[in-house]
Image (tube, grey):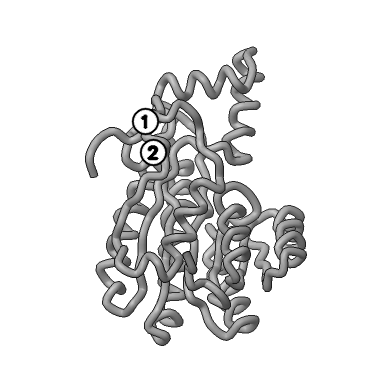
Amino acid sequence: MDLGLTSRVFVVTGASAGIGKATAQILVEEGARVVICARGADRLEALATELRQAGGDVRTVVADVADPASTEAIRTTALEAFGRVDGVVNAAGVSTGEHLRDYSDESWTAAYAVNTLSAVRLSMALVPHMRERGWGRIVTVGSTAGRNPDPRFASYGAAKAALMHATRALSRAYAKYGILTNCVLPGLTRTESVLAGYESAARHMGVTPDDVEKRMMELDPIAMGRTGRPEEVAKMVVFLCSEAASWISGAIIPVDGGTIRDLP
């Protein structure tokens, strides 16, 4: 299937690792040009080198998307390099990792700033450039935690729930201009941050990382009986960026191996 992504220009945040990285890799494979953004300069430049060696036309922006100044830096980089923006994948995210019983304004504000506000801010900044061309794609990377409340990840889940609502609001506002907005909900996926969390928990509990993952799956069973891989989520993200997704907007799509068991 031709996804119609050749020479399209996409911004990908949270691109140095995990789902964002896998998304940038697949977009380049499909012929898209990309602006990749993340906080870590070394990992971001390593990815840029990899993508260029694969024939990709890539620009980088080292920035924290929680900082409003990052929005202008990303937009300026894309327009100066490529003269257009066709879509944005908001893959940047963070879990502050505290239990609800350890609530603080600071941790909840930090979770909301990265997981929700940054995605809405950047999307709104890029919407005019997509609207003038009559074509655009906005994909947000949510989480099953936004659908399945868990006191262990309350601030993260609440922020991702807000992101789902914002995604549908963007769809209602801009689909009529050819800008289609959708949200992907990954389940437990073996990203670098998740694996680091396993390592940290294992050291604290005196068990192995595999033991930690097994316990996570016991608490929130996955129908397929395994965790996901970043590229499995990224393939859905890229599909939603494509011409093939021309009749999909405002959708909230679990990519979770069967974690969510209730109806939408």
Number of numbered discs present? 2
Task: Find the distance from the CA under tag 1 to the CA under tag 2.
Answer: 7 Å
**Residue at 41% from the left image edge and 74% from the top image edge:** 136
Q: Quadrant of residue 262?
A: top left
Q: Please, what is the three-letter code of the amino acid marked with disc 1? A: Asp
Foreground residue, 224 or 129? 224
Q: Amino acid at mark 2?
A: Ala
Left or right of 196, for residue 181:
left
Classify 46 as above or below 185: below
Nearer-the-camera pick, 61 or 106: 61
Among the two numbered marks 1 and 2 on one chain, the one whose residue lies closer to the N terminus: 2
Residue 150 is labelled as 1
- Residue 127: assigned label: none
* Mark 2 surroundings: few (<14), some (14-19) or many (≥20) residues within 10 A: many
Q: Which residue is mark 2?
A: 145
At x 56%, y 60%, the residue is: 13
Residue 64 horizontal/vertical position (percent) = 60, 58
Residue 168 horizontal/vertical position (percent): 29, 60
User: The C terminus is located in which quarter?
Assistant: top left
Residue 150 x, y percent position in the rendering: 37, 30
Q: Are marks 1 and 2 in contact (CB under 8 Å)?
A: yes
Q: For the residue labelled by badge 2, is the local secondary structure a helix, a strand or a loop? A: helix
The correct choice, above or below, for 233 with respect to 145 in the image is: below
| Residue at 51 percent of width and 49 percent of height | 93
In the picture, measured across the screen, residue 246 lies left or right of residue 47, that is left
Label 1 packing within 10 angstroms: few (<14), some (14-19), many (20+): some
The residue at the far front in this view is 1
Q: Quadrant of residue 221?
A: top left
> Would residue 240 appear left or right of 28 to someone viewing this image?
left
User: In this rendering, would 184 be left or right of 13?
Assistant: left
The residue located at (29%, 72%) in the rendering is 175
Give the structural element (helix, strand or loop) at label 1.
loop
